[in-house]
Image (tube, rainbow, N blue to C red):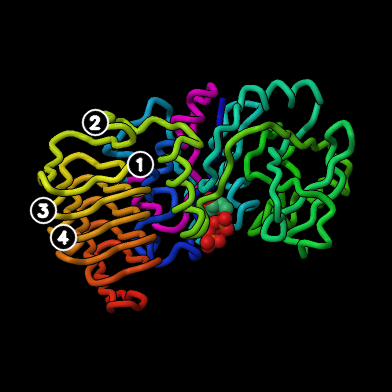
Amino acid sequence: MDAILLVGGFGTRLMPLTQRLPKPLIPLANIPFVERQIAWLREAGVDHVILSLHYNAELFQRYFAQKTPDVAISFAIEDTPLGTGGAIKNCVPFLSADRLYICNGDIFTTLHLPKMLRAHRDTGARISIALNEVEDPSRFGVIETDADGRIHTFTEKPPRHLARSRDINAGIYLFEREVLAHFPDGPCSVERDIFPALLRAELPMHGYRAPQYWTDLGTPGDYLQAHRDILDGRVRIPLGTREILPGIWAGERVDIADDALLRPPLLIGAGARIGRGAVVGPMTVLGRGVAVLPYARVEDSIIWEGARVLRDSVVISSVIGRYAQAGGRVTAGLCGDGGQLLGIAGGQAEAA
Ligand code: GTP
């Protein structure tokens, strides 16, 4: 079965983390998210993934030239961004089956796709849209269904008190391929333009609701929260490392000073170094080869591959990019790849 992964967006809400690295290539628990998403699709029986690309497309091509997943990969590249609808249409020449999954490239979920496929067949829908129930739907696309699950309204980002449902578009779709013939040429949004137009044309579209873990990774807050959920076991995914102490997972060749304090839950990537008197965790992920220098403290933070936390510094609720440096006192700081984040005692950090 085919799947389209929409991974061409700019990831502006995650800037500066996405200045060099597109959002789907940023690590989730030390593995690029797109790799986790492809593994999830493969488990559901997908054998061909079409990556719908624009922003930094060559970084995806380079990544998959080095790392071949167990599915066939095609690259559908847009010269100018086509929006989510145009991007899907741009993938049509690569499709080989009559039915396909389409997924936003920033949705982290344990949704069981084969069950969604069964429901799709049973209802006879031409499009099925996974739904997720949330407390506050005001920053999402809200969907109303009837008792049989047939969709009868779409409302983009309604004010909270006006939302007629708490079910939101979860960004995971099952399409009959023939529906793509109705897509116009040129840029358009599948959520704002295509779905409402197909509804007016009375195409059968159903919502698929299932208990599941679901989050998007669109903002720094979502990204940090997804890691807290992984580390405290709310959602289980392979960490690819050994649990060396309760709640502490570590890769090969880590170097931890005898008097460093490790506070679980904590994930330490291969080759990471933790210096004398440092305190690391809880709710923290150190990437491959990260160095936490003596007497530094790192808590509730995600430190990407090769980054350094300088001596005596304190880094809390922050994300530090690959080969970047963080020093001083940093709270809720964000630093892109190769950057420098030097906090001022008691204040917010500034990126250099
Ligand atoms: P923001 O800029 O922070 O909104 O992020 P985004 O545009 O990367 O993500 P958004 O949530 O707006 O889009 C949902 C999904 O569609 C993401 O996985 C994007 O990569 C993808 N996407 C958005 N616009 C385009 C586009 O024009 N072309 C392609 N190929 N993918 C897109």
Task: Name which residue type carries label 3.
Answer: Arg
Looking at the image, residue 309 sits to the left or right of residue 80; the answer is left
Residue designated by label 2: 244
Where on the picture, by quarter, is residue 30? top left
Please, what is the three-letter code of the amino acid marked with disc 4? Tyr
Residue 194, percent from left and from top:
74, 51
As helix, strand or loop, the secondary structure at mark 1 comes to loop
The numbered mark, 1 or 4, whose residue comes first in the sequence reads 1
Please rate how many residues cluster around mark 4, counting C-alpha atoms within 10 Å: few if below 14, some from 14 to 19, many from 20: many
| Residue 50 appears in the rendering | yes
The residue labelled by disc 4 is: 295
Q: Which of 146 and 136 lies nearest the eye of the viewer?
A: 136
The residues tagged by marks 4 and 3 sit, at their Cα atoms, a distance apart of 6 Å
Q: Would the CB of label 3 be found within 8 Å of ligand 1? A: no
Where does the image place residue 221, in percent across and percent down from the top left?
A: 49, 58
Residues 237 and 195: in front is: 237
How far, Cα to Cα, is label 3 from label 2? Answer: 19 Å
Chain part drawn in magenta: 37-61
Name the residue type under label 1: Pro
| C-alpha distance separating marks 1 and 4 | 20 Å
Disc 4 Cβ-to-ligand 1 distance below 8 Å: no
Q: Secondary structure at mark 2?
A: strand
- Whether residue 214 sits left or right of residue 250 in the image: it is right
Is residue 240 inside the magenta stretch? no
Residue drawn at (24%, 59%), measured in percent from left and top? 297
Q: Estimate the x, y position of residue 111 in percent, counting from the top left.
A: 60, 32
Q: Would you say the residues marked 4 and 2 are in contact, meaning their CB atoms lie under 8 Å apart?
A: no
Q: Is mark 4 in CB contact (under 8 Å) with mark 3? A: yes
Q: Which residue is mark 3?
A: 276
